[in-house]
Image (cartoon, helix red, strand yellow):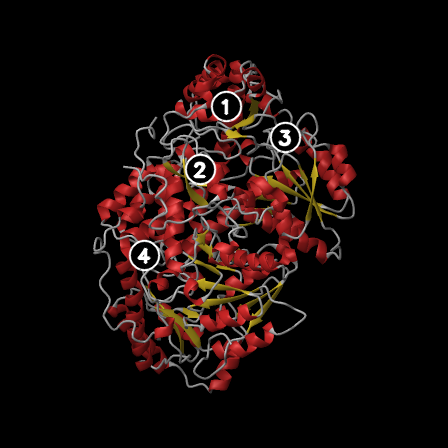
Amino acid sequence: MPYGPHTMADRARMLATVGIDSVDELFADIPVALRASRLDLPEPEPELVLAARLESLAARNRVDLASFLGAGVYRHYSPAAVDQILLRGEWYTAYTPYQPEISQGTLQSIYEYESLIAELVALDVVSASHYDGAAATAEAALMTCRSTRRERVLVSRAVHRQYRETLATYFLGGELELDEIPVVADGPDAGTTDLAALERLLAEADRPVAGVIAGQPNFFGLLEPMAEIGRLAHATGALFVAVVEPVSLAVLAPPGAYGADIAAGEGQPLGIAPQYGGPFLGILACTDGLVRQIPGRLVGMTADLDGKRAYVMTMRAREQDIRREKAASNICTNQALLALAASVYLACIGPHGLRDVAALGAARAAELEAALAAAGAPRLHPGPYLNEFVVRVPDAPAVHRRLLERGILAGLVLAEAEPGDPALADGLLVCATEVTTAEEIDRFAAALADALADAPAVEPGARTAATAGAVR
Amino acid sequence: MSVGGSKLQSTIFEKSRPGRGGGKVPHAPHDALERIPAGARRAAPPALPEMNEPEVVRHYVNLSQLNYSIDNGFYPLGSCTMKWNPKLNEWAARLPGFAGLHPLAPDSTAQGTLQLLWELEEQLAEISGMRAVTLQPAAGAQGELTGILMIRAYHRSRGEPDRTEVLVPDSSHGTNPATATMAGFSTITIPSAPDGGVDLDAFRAALGPRTAAVMITNPSTLGLFEARIGELLEAVHAAGALAYMDGANLNAILGRFKPGEAGFDVMHFNVHKTFSTPHGGGGPGAGPVGVGDTLVPFLPAPRVLREADGTYRLERAGERPGSIGRMRSFVGNTGVLVRAYAYIRAHGGSGLREVSDDAVLAANYLKARLAGTYDIPYDRACKHEFVASAASIKKATGVRTLDIAKRLIDHGYHPPTIYFPLIVEEGMLIEPTETESVETLDAFAEALIAIAAEAYETPELVREAPHGAPVRRLDEATAARQPNLRWRPMAGAETPCPD
């Protein structure tokens, strides 16, 4: 065993102390009929061999592409200090801070995380973190139901599809209702939540709504009329959940400013690597009034017996290990190490740096928009966006494949990500951040222009029918 | 003790000075945000701290030294399997090919990670005796929810929506009943038998046409193998219900007991326990779920598939209509799963069996060392952990298990899990794991024996412990009654800022 300490003499001494001859005696209580068949696994590998195997697997992934892919996970520069801190064993090999006297580091770091996110979202209560943006959004939806004692939630179709799918799964148990608010089809507001439809959905008298969920920016990168959505929700006694992207909050109005009761979102952009989907950081925050409804760990400031400032997990009566079947959620773990990453990132980058990150993304995205339009791919939606937008590309899936051959990851093919929506059949969702270079934008635009010049002329109608069938 | 000399820190907000920091990213052009309508813009910037890099790094290094961790020393926290976290695994997860891969990258550009995930699913299926595994759940508790939602879908697919009850023993983890509630079931709690095992008769009496599932932790949270598990599983299936195994204690039975072979229908793995992924101060984890044949159609989407030509891909939207759907965004906590994969490959089948053999031997050794000083409520061969109790000490001296746990801190150890399972008076659940040397086990036993002596001779010394930690016991009541959950400029006024 590679990490075990025991010599043969150690084992002999331990067996003698226990008073047995063989360790097999300690497994005698497993009924013979239920004993395991042989473990048929590969042979153990020495570290040198295993390291080479892992390097060769990692090398089979293509991370050398000029990438314009975002769609909920964003490439950002993470200052070198962030990972250096995360590599300290005192952080990553500690357990949940159940013994506060020897966990003040973790506890204070979580308190500071809660405070930093509270500043960003302008809401006072922040959980110690959830699994990811999708799970945090699902927990937010359940909070609205518990709090209003209503059983129906409305979610904008312009919220990430995977978030909506996660919501649907979390709603199975309580047999709660989830209705989708359509998106405006055309005109200046195309691609944003349809306010008239929202009003109609809220007006169904016998089906009162617990919560309304919309994203800022939304999945298509567009800015939503959040204050108006919140007003409509509140007018019928529903709560308003804002799904937010944390870097954008350096420049966009925070949820607390436009009346959101709960904010949820994916904290990955705060210094956390894409890692093919996780571990990420589920941000969940709410107003003071909802503090007893928020699931997950909370850390508070208190004092020790000498009056010295100290930190402790608090309001634990909401949690599963105390309340069991009456708990607010079954959540046990949080994403403490990722919350630490986000905190170190924010402390390193500072308020001005975060504004620069958000504004640089907007500037690069504007350059990208101009370059792609010149190459023959105009935007699909006319409304304002921050750093992500949809372009219209004839036969988008095929063009996306051709660009991949030239080392360009041309964003997300919406015909595959949002199958069945003809309005999006020609769409590519692309984004830029502060790490996007002018050279990458030039390469993308040039390759796109080539691909469009080579493409056979197809009637728009025929094209839509052909691509609508393509499903990821 | 390493953390004893560490200094408490004021908050990053108190350390902030306007104008400090910068130099990490270029400045944005002045007109970068002109396109953003005024109404959508933030009026005042968030009050984030302004610090330079040396201050930030010292803040977090000094805070880290207030923590106890595996890298510091012995951490016998029962039920949590605080084993060594191999350094190779940290290196591997940070390889740019793994860390830099976008989760929506086309399958053709993600073949290395997809192969690793596919192989890990196969390995976990072999270890558990299950047919198939999903790696999607983000943690053990989410794995439980995944499993119970699959059970719900199974009963509904058979036209039995009235199976609304989940049975759990009273020794279970709190997540089990909380999960049942979240999945829309009611929980029936079954008392344990006097020997600490499942009370077969009580289960039989509670099983019926309304039973959807039974959730069992095996070995139990008392560290005991459920010897009657075969009969229980038969009774569960005879009643038309399914059997869920909480895999929290898998570290005891690798290569000795495969839950799927024995008849469990579904189980979750806590990779941060059995497969050495670091606990991270409370997360991240990952909670893969293994299922037998009956539940395969209901697995969450997307699954990782291997094509006939040896390439790998993710399932496409709608490809498997019976799926319960998605538990979270993307495929799972891949960065955590890379570490678990490395751990399994380092050990192989023979090494994993040795892991359990040594973990169980260490627990029995420590139990033997402590018997005579502490009560051992269930004095038979334990698995990877055991319960000791200070009930007799408390009766004689007034010193409680909590006090003994806090006094262990002064002796340089992380305390065991205390007052869990709830059914043991003054219980402490001790789990040494397989990666601790016999010298460490001896020194820990001697510390606990010395504290028992202190309880008789100088009880106030134990009752007021810890004495050498960065802080003394905390005022948890005020923290809960008047919660201070975020920094405000004046929030720390009553509790003095550390120097």
Q: Could you tell whether B283 is left or right of B177 in the image?
A: left
Q: Which residue is mark 2?
A: A95
Expressed as whole percent of the image width and height from the top left, the position of residue A178 reads 60, 65
User: What mark, if any, has residue A374 been given in the picture?
Assistant: none
Under tag 2, what secondary structure?
Answer: loop
Under tag 3, what secondary structure?
Answer: loop
Q: Nearer the viewer, mark 2 or mark 1?
A: 2
Vertical order, B86 against B359 (above or below): below
Q: Which residue is mark 3?
A: B423
Under tag 1, what secondary structure?
Answer: helix
Expressed as whole percent of the image width and height from the top left, the position of residue B476 reads 47, 37
C-alpha distance separating marks 2 and 1: 21 Å
Q: Residue A405 or A383: which is nearer the viewer?
A: A383
C-alpha distance separating marks 4 and 1: 51 Å
User: What mark, if any, has residue B362 been given in the picture?
Assistant: 1
For label 2, the crowd category at 10 Å Cα-Cα, with few meaning under 14, some 14 to 19 and many 20 or more, is many
Q: Which residue is mark 4?
A: B47
